[in-house]
Amino acid sequence: MNVNWEKRFSFRLQEEDKEIYNLLLQVPENKRSETIRQMLRFAYRTMLDGKKTQQDIQGIVAEIRSLKENQELKHQELLKKIGNGVAIRNEEIYKSNDDKMNEQAIDDSASAMLSSFGVNFD
């Protein structure tokens, strides 16, 4: 890249640039150009850092969104598993109760039959 270092840039201060005007009045005349260059360099680097920071923040926000979506998905899966587990457990309890009632009915029937023949286990 061939740069023409002899190129000069100039600008005029406007009414709203009173702060810059007052600052430059405090700088010796032979140092103003260097001061302006340093200020522009600082402003440019600050803008680049701001853009990089903004990109980093956007990346972090995207990662947080992804983690949140993944967490919500896992949460829904867990709720389904818990729901299925409760349903299965309820079925097991009812089945267990049915088995106990069946055993009790068999015992009662056997006792009634034996007592009809005069056999008592009391």
Image (cartoon, rainbow, N blue to C red):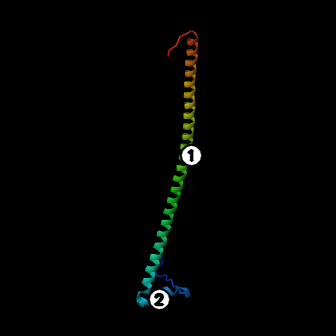
- N-terminal of the two: label 2 or label 1? 2
Q: Position of residue 116 (x, y in %)?
A: 58, 11
Instruction: Name the residue at 57% across, 24% down.
Output: 101
Task: Between residue 73 and residue 31, name the one nearer to us.
Answer: 73
Q: Is residue 15 left or right of residue 22?
A: right
Does dot 1 land on a helix, a strand or a loop?
Answer: helix
Task: Between residue 84 and residue 24, name the one nearer to us.
Answer: 84
Q: Is residue 2 visible?
A: no
The amino acid pointed to by label 1 is: Gln
Residue 44: mark in rendering:
none
Residue 22: mark in rendering:
2
Query: Do tag 2 and tag 1 residues touch (Cβ < 8 Å)?
Result: no
Q: CA distance from mark 2 to mark 1?
A: 63 Å
Does dot 2 land on a helix, a strand or a loop?
Answer: helix
Q: Is residue 25 visible?
A: yes
Q: Quarter of the image holding residue 65?
A: bottom right
> For the residues carrying marks 2 and 1, which lies nearer the camera in this image?
1
Instruction: Name the residue at 44% across, 76% down.
Output: 42
Vertical placement of residue 76 versus 114, above or below = below
Task: Between residue 35 and residue 50, name the one nearer to us.
Answer: 50
Q: Which residue is mark 1?
A: 76
Q: Position of residue 107 (x, y in %)?
A: 55, 18
Vertical placement of residue 57 versus 122, above or below = below
Q: Position of residue 12 (x, y in %)?
A: 53, 87
Q: Position of residue 51 (x, y in %)?
A: 50, 68
The amino acid pointed to by label 2 is: Asn
Vertical placement of residue 116 versus 25, above or below = above
Task: Between residue 66 and residue 92, name the one nearer to us.
Answer: 92
